[in-house]
Amino acid sequence: MGEMSSFQLGVVGALFLSVASSVSIVICNKALMSNLGFPFATTLTSWHLMVTFCTLHAAQRLNFFESKSIDTKTVMLFGILNGVSIGLLNLSLGFNSIGFYQMTKLAIIPFTVLLETLFLNKQFSRKIKFALFLLLVGVGIASVTDLQLNLVGTILSLLAIVTTCVGQILTNTIQKRLNVSSTQLLYQSAPFQAAILFVSGPLVDQFLTKQNVFAYKYSPLVLGFIVLSCLIAVSVNFSTFLVIGKTSPVTYQVLGHLKTCLILGFGYTLLHDPFTERNIIGILIAICGMGLYSFFCTQESKKKQSPDLSLVSQIKDKDTTQLLGHPDKESHEAKKSTKDSVV
């Protein structure tokens, strides 16, 4: 029971760290890009990953965690896949309206459920599916405003959905099957993610913004926000792998939509972004869906644990009976020996 409570505490800590760091980096990046005019999102992500790797390398040198070797081909393909998915998401945002981009992010949950059902034989109950549906409807009402379709944007969105889902499923699967921690996997894969984005980032950003990241005039304030963004990104990347490893890709996506609702709320409160009744209704429906998802997941988790606990109890009872049986046997043998000696 102590191990179970410790695990649950670790999950809550990972979820809290993920929410806090993600909301912080969105606010920081919004100030950097909207207010200070630094539009190079993909290149900035490559810097995030490089700083993350350097931080983890320093931590490993100081023995904060033990590095574990993973098959080079596996970790290379995994890192490249995650890097490509980030680039495709940014291209999807560039080629589509914000509303269609939000729909792309909403489609990640049902597609992840489909992939895990087909290829990993994972079962999702009707209650869980209903909670997820309610969540998606709420977030859709709150965040999707317009849907302008175009062929290139649609293809990029589909590719972004596929690569993101596969990448997040592999994040969970690799940690469990190869018995590596989230820190070890991130440490091994971050250089490959950073490399693919460091090469492609400036090209993607120039194509989307018509500006060159190397020709940009960096003021001290912009540099300060870039450094701050990179430092927060270490926590974001670490908590992402941690949450997916401890829970599941679907739960991570549910958490992502909670962040969306919080960001909408912070935007209205701190940045005075426009906020309508539709936003409020959508957020309330989404929170209701999240609450139901959490409740149903907890219920199903307890149902799975109860047979295991009863099995353990039966084994303990059996062992106790056997242990109690030995003294009786020894006593009987002793009495028999005494009787024989008397005769």
Image (spheres, rainbow, N blue to C red):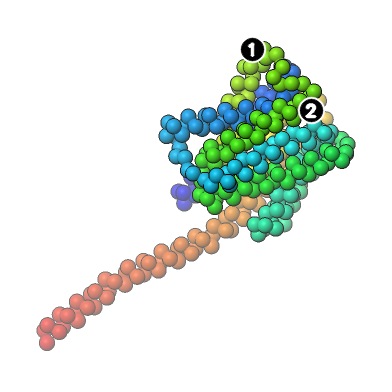
SS class, disc 1: helix
- Can residue 244 be seen? no
Badge 2 crowding class, 10 Å Cα cut-off, few under 14, some 14 to 19, many 20 or more, is: some
| Picture coordinates of residue 139, whole percent (x, y) | 77, 39
Q: Residue at the location (65% across, 13% down)? A: 221
Residue 97 drawn above or below residue 168: above
- Work out whether residue 259 or residue 203 is closer to the camera in this orientation and state it: 203
The answer to which of marks 2 and 1 sits earlier in the sequence is 2
- Residue lying farthest top? 220
Which is more foreground, mark 2 or mark 1? Answer: 2
Which kind of residue does numbered mark 2 sit on?
Leu
For the C terminus, the quadrant is bottom left
Which residue is disc 2 drawn over? 208
| Picture coordinates of residue 8, whole percent (x, y) | 53, 45
- Work out whether residue 162 or residue 304 is closer to the camera in this orientation and state it: 162
Q: Which mark is residue 220?
A: 1
- Work out whether residue 147 or residue 301 is closer to the camera in this orientation and state it: 147
Left or right, 170 with respect to 155, comes to: left
- Residue lying farthest left? 342
Which kind of residue does numbered mark 1 sit on?
Pro
